[in-house]
């Protein structure tokens, strides 16, 4: 076996172009600093020591990560509802759907965050390997059952598919996974081993990097086996679907803007540092050393001697500040656009109901996640011989009529999370025309303080 089993195919690479940038943004300031020149270029003739100082003092405004969190929290602000056709056994599995303590609500929220960030996420319905289990009763006694596994976008390597009975069906799937193994010689020591899993209908293989007969490292077959399920139990979850196993990140442009903000903010910090440290300029002094300080006096015999500070005019600083605020405003708009209902883009079911409004992009993503969960529940049912896996419903009664309303909703979420001040929130709401001009924040804050406080409500910052 050649090392090609570990390589990502051109089909996946086409989707993965922006994944390193997205991963760095989700990793925060530390990850962006670690990326170095990739997202904060070193300018021509810039001293390396100065660049490293600039890099190590840069901080990330987490617009991309925060927007993902806020948007994905909306569908899961209410519990998932299961249909009456959902078998009792499947409902029991949903209380610990991944055998790691997460219920279906928490697992689906994590899947949606991954799909929103990267554009695609995988959901594998796996089943433990068993040897001495022969009947369903044996499985139940042993606690063996199917479970969900989240396959990150970055783990995907390749797939093959073909249309079977009119449905596009996986015929091969290949992805990376990390396995933790104990050291036989030391019970407190463990290591993480990277392996490639290859799935076929009814069978599976794993590959690990080992030395071949010639002593070279090569990805070789490690284990293989068969399954009772004659299909690949994998369901793709899309953020913005382009085709079968083809997608793009819905907030891709926001990610680029966040990188632009990272770079512009670094430039702003640099010019502020320069402006805050004025240069002392003197003429007409002797060659003797001068002592400069708060407790020192400078004298000179020359009547032409002058001593003054050269300071920055500040115009560039203000221009940089306005530019940064403009980027932040555009980032808020891009995030808010996913909440704006766009008439005309309706589903077949909505077309049948005259009173149904259009849908916003986030509602469509929520429906896609809901459909994927239904498919995964059906695969879980097939593992245990149930005819029907049931259905679930994720809350999607949200959306805004306009961009101003949607962006205001995001601002409020940021304020509640403590990353936006009350005064800034008031100013932004007023700028969107939702509060009439002429009302000053100081006056409004005074009114809030004087009004009777509602029972059980704490007014932040008042």
Image: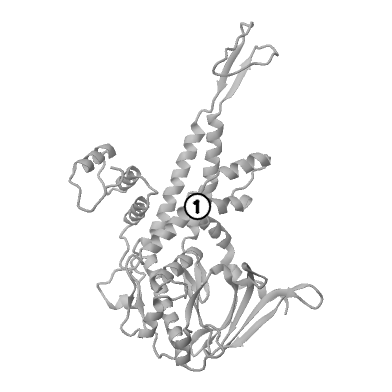
Q: Position of residue 313 (x, y in %)?
A: 51, 28
Q: Name the residue located 35 percent from the left edge and 84 percent from the top edge.
A: 88
Reading the image, the residue beneath label 1 is 258
Q: Secondary structure at mark 1?
A: helix
Q: Is residue 336 left or right of residue 274?
A: left
| Residue 46 in view (yes/no) | no
Q: Name the residue located 32 percent from the left edge and 67 percent from the top edge.
A: 78
Q: Position of residue 340 (x, y in %)?
A: 35, 61
* Residue found farthest to the left: 452
Q: Position of residue 220 (x, y in %)?
A: 71, 78
Position of residue 393 relative to residue 203, above or below, is above
Q: Name the residue located 47 percent from the left edge and 79 percent from the top edge.
A: 147
Q: Nearer the viewer, residue 182 or 197?
A: 182
Mark 1 crowdedness (10 Å alpha carbons): few <14, some 14-19, many ≥20: many
Q: Position of residue 431 (x, y in %)?
A: 32, 45
- Would you identify the image quadrant in which residue 8 lies? bottom right
Q: Nearer the viewer, residue 229 or 14?
A: 229
- Would you identify the image quadrant in which residue 2 lies? bottom right
């Amino acid at each position: 076996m050649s090392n090609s089993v570990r390589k990502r195919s051109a089909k996946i690479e086409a989707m993965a172009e922006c994944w390193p940038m997205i991963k760095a943004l989700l990793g925060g300031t530390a990850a962006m600093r670690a990326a170095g020149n990739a997202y904060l270029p070193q300018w021509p003739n810039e001293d390396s020591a100065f660049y490293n100082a600039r890099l190590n003092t840069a901080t990330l405004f987490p617009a991309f990560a925060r927007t993902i969190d806020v948007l994905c929290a909306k569908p899961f602000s209410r519990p998932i509802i299961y249909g009456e056709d959902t078998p009792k056994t499947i409902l029991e599995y949903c209380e610990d759907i991944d055998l790691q303590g997460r219920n279906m609500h928490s697992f689906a929220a994590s899947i949606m965050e991954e799909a929103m960030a990267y554009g695609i996420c995988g959901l594998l319905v796996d089943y433990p390997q068993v040897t001495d289990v022969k009947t369903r009763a044996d499985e139940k006694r042993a606690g063996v059952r199917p479970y969900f596994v989240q396959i990150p976008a970055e783990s995907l390597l390749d797939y093959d598919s073909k249309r079977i009975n009119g449905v596009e069906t996986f015929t091969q799937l290949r992805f990376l996974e990390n396995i933790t193994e104990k050291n036989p010689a030391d019970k407190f020591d463990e290591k993480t081993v990277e392996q490639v899993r290859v799935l076929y209908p009814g069978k599976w293989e794993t590959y690990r990097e080992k030395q071949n007969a010639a002593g070279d490292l090569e990805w070789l077959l490690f284990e293989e086996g068969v399954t009772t399920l004659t299909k690949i139990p994998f369901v793709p979850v899309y953020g913005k679907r382009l085709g079968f196993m083809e997608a793009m990140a819905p907030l891709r442009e926001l990610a680029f803007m966040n990188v632009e903000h990272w770079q512009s903010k670094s430039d702003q910090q640099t010019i502020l540092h320069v402006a805050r440290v004025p240069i002392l300029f003197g003429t007409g002094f002797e060659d003797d050393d001068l002592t400069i300080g708060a407790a020192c006096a400078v004298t000179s015999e020359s009547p032409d001697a002058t001593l003054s500070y050269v300071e920055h005019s500040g115009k560039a600083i203000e221009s940089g500040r306005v530019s940064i605020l403009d980027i932040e405003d555009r980032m808020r708009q891009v995030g808010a656009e996913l909440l704006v209902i766009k008439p005309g883009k309706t589903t077949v079911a909505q077309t049948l109901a005259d009173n149904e409004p259009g849908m916003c992009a986030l509602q469509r993503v929520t429906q896609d996640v809901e459909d994927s969960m239904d498919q995964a529940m059906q695969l879980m049912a097939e593992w245990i011989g149930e005819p029907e896996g049931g259905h679930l419903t994720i809350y999607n009664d949200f959306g805004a009529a306009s961009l101003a309303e949607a962006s205001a909703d995001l601002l409020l979420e940021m304020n509640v999370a403590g990353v936006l001040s009350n005064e800034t929130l008031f100013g932004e709401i007023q700028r969107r025309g939702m509060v009439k001009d002429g009302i000053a924040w100081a006056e409004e804050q005074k009114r809030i303080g004087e009004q009777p406080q509602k029972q059980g409500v704490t007014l932040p910052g008042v």
